[in-house]
Amino acid sequence: MMKVLFINETCGRGSHGRICTDIADIITENGGQCKIGYGRDTVPDNYQKYAIRIGNSFDIYIHVLGSRVFDNTGFYSAGATKEFIHKVEEFNPDIIHLHNLHGYYINIKLLFEYFKTCGKPIIWTLHDCWPFTGHCTCSDYIGCDKWKTGCFRCPQKTNYPTCNLVDNSRGNFKKKKELFTKIPNLYIVTPSIWLKGQVEASFLYEYPVRVIESGIDLRTFKPSQGNFRGKYHLENKTVLLSVANAWSDRKGLAEYYKLSEMLDDSYQLVMVGNLRGEALPQNTLHIEHTNNQQELAEIYTESDVYLNFSCEETQGLTTVEALACGTPVLVIDRTAIAECVNDSCGVVLKAFDEHTMLDDINTAKYKEKEACLAQAAKYEKGICFEKYIAFYEELVK
């Protein structure tokens, strides 16, 4: 009977929190036991049985405040982390599976000092680059590679995890390198080949790294007709869709502005997601972020081409969601996005080319629906979870 402990910022909410609870459900259905250590947000009622809260709202407040001033995310919440480690020892898991450790809820120094002596196999799924940088979650957009040798004077100090005063990127880098290396039985997983390459170029290079893609629920993301076109009077338009949780320059806004200026009345650019104060490109339909995945599936389905111009993605699951709804895609080959696309279901561009963009969009538009569905089937979430469970069994044996 396998016992697995997960540690993540959330439990049952957000993509990473749902990965933890979905795998936990499979393990418990097969007679195992699971616990999920989490720090933020509420837990859905059906997942309370797994949840172990790390600290409380006051702990998070102090952690955030300290990080804002001293730029040392991950080095607060000492009392909460000590209490959590006691609960971990009582649970005595066979496997410890880490996900996001940033989020102002856990003390990484105490946690990794415990890992050095606990004797447990530890899997760490990296969803961004924070574990091997001195501050940021990704630096590809600004072309910074200080993380390869040693961070200092961080150009993204005011980006998440935000600091408004001290630049402690040099100290953070040194502490992380000391804490995160030389851990017995640590195995790293990334959701893309691109992020695997980043890990192998960092101080984490000593660890084995395998790629297990994050999956999507094909019962939700599937061809789904609704009233999206009728509601917005788009019946005779070529609908170009893009989706982001929150829009920013990193999501390729500059390219969407360029594209909007190129489109005549036969096209409609649609952008779904929180603008957070960003100005909207002209001739663009904006739809606020929705938690209704069925509605989102209908929007994907009724669009002609899905666009992803993002500059920083460790996988790019919105692209896969679009494919799962039978919609062909056009992406720019930055970071990991192109790994989700092949020639039969979409178009991959090396860069945004104003001279060929409309031709490229029309090429993508006529890709076969069946090819899109076949590509998305490779990312069915059950396949992802089976790979993780096989990995657990391999390590336990």
Image (spheres, rainbow, N blue to C red):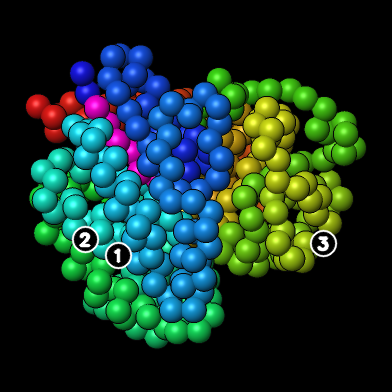
The prevailing secondary structure element of the residues shown in magenta is strand
Residue 342 seen in the current view: no
> In the shown orientation, is residue 359 left or right of residue 23?
right
The residue that mark 2 highlights is 180
The residue that mark 1 highlights is 132
Location of residue 181 (image quadrant):
bottom left
Picture coordinates of residue 241, whole percent (x, y): 69, 45
Quadrant containing the N terminus is top left
Picture coordinates of residue 67, whole percent (x, y): 46, 71
Residue name at image x 21 percent, y 64 percent: 179
| In the image, residue 383 above or below residue 319 | above
The residue that mark 3 highlights is 282
Mark 1 lies on a secondary structure that is helix
Labels 2 & 1 near each other (Cβ < 8 A): yes
Mark 2 lies on a secondary structure that is helix
| In the image, residue 30 above or below residue 356 | above
Please give the label number shown on residue 326. none
Tell which of 133 and 344 is nearer to you: 133
Residue 6 in the magenta stretch? The answer is: yes
> In the shown orientation, is residue 137 left or right of residue 311?
left
Residue name at image x 80 percent, y 32 percent: 228
Which residue type carries mark 2? Phe
Magenta-highlighted residues: 3-8
> In the shown orientation, is residue 291 left or right of residue 22?
right
Mark 3 lies on a secondary structure that is loop
Quadrant containing the C terminus is top left
